[in-house]
Image (tube, rainbow, N blue to C red):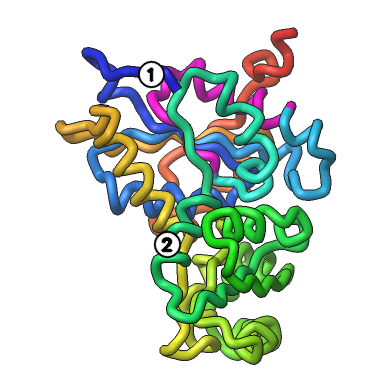
Amino acid sequence: MNTAPGQGLATRPIGVFDSGIGGLTVVRALRERLPNEDIVYFGDTARVPYGTKSAETVVRFSRECFSFLVRRGIKLLVVACNTASAIALPELRGSLQLPMLGVIEPGVSAALAATRTRTVGVVGTAATMASGAYDRCLRAADPGVTVVQSACPLFVPLAEEGWVEGEVPRLVARRYLEPLIKAGIDTLILGCTHYPMLREVIAEALGPRICLVDSAEETASATASLLERLGLARAEHGGACRVFVTDSAPRFAAVGGAFLGGRLEAVTVVDQSDLPWYER
């Protein structure tokens, strides 16, 4: 990573990439933590989900979407997709001369700092849990940690339908989390960017003794630290947020406002002639 600060670089936007809509929870955390920063969000909604694709395909899709954001003059890339963070980010860090971070490492660091018993739980989609990305990252940082994982697939449709409170999500949360509680976890990582939408019911099911780690919030904190370290933090007010998707703008706009914590001003469907994979 050879990028150095220079005149005008600080006013460039932060690029945020996800395979779909969940990454808007990261954008929400970034806007709360870094209100002066402009953000460009790219959701590859035409090809979601990435979790069912091969590693080679995930790397190729991610590289193409990164290229779209780089062409918009971003100063830093946030990979707000657990699958792309696990598979594509390690491949691309050495090839792209741009500061970048994913959502896995910040959450892992926060969990290891919080745990008292060194028994950490992780919840995410079936694909993320099957990838073993959180388990590997946790054990690499602390070989003695005990990792208890659980796939919670119903959390995603509940979040997208807006069923984030009430008896139904409470029952689902209790059912999913009971085995982790019985396993003795004292810290839980939300390993999917949809899951912060259900934070209250998840916290209720866990009880007050278990620390809840929101990867979106931790990623925003890590981004702020990285910008300061590189001298790229924006001092004057910005705060604009541009959103690009590859398909289904009306649906994205209708659901995305809840994820963002406010109304989406505009969602642009990228014309195919402007997509990086058509540049070959």
Q: Residues within 10 Å of mark 2 (few under 14, many from 20)?
A: some
**Are the two marked residues, 1 and 2, in contact with CB atoms closer than 8 angstroms?**
no
**Residue 119 in which image quadrant:** bottom right
Say which label, 1 or 2, has the lower sequence index: 1
Work out whether 242 lies above or below 179: above
Apparent side of residue 229 relative to residue 132 in the rendered image (left or right): left
On the image, the x and y values in percent for residue 11 come to: 26, 24
Q: Residue at x 54, y 61 (%)?
A: 142
Return the residue at label 1.
3
Q: Position of residue 269 (x, y in %)?
A: 60, 31
Looking at the rendering, in which quadrant would you find the N terminus?
Answer: top left
Q: Position of residue 19 (x, y in %)?
A: 65, 42
Looking at the rendered structure, the secondary structure element under dot 1 is loop
Residue type pointed to by label 2: Ala
User: Image height check: is 8 above or below 108?
Assistant: above
Q: Residues within 10 Å of mark 1 (few under 14, many from 20)?
A: few
Q: What residue do we see at 57% from left, 69% from top?
A: 145
Expressed as whole percent of the image width and height from the top left, the position of residue 25 reads: 48, 55
Please name the residue shown 55% across and 66% down the image: 190
Q: Which residue is mark 2?
A: 110
The amino acid on which the numbered mark 1 sits, given as a three-letter code, is Thr
Give the side of residue 263 with respect to residue 278, left or right: left
Q: Is residue 165 left or right of residue 128?
A: left
Mark sitting on residue 153? none
Q: Which residues are magenta?
A: 60-79
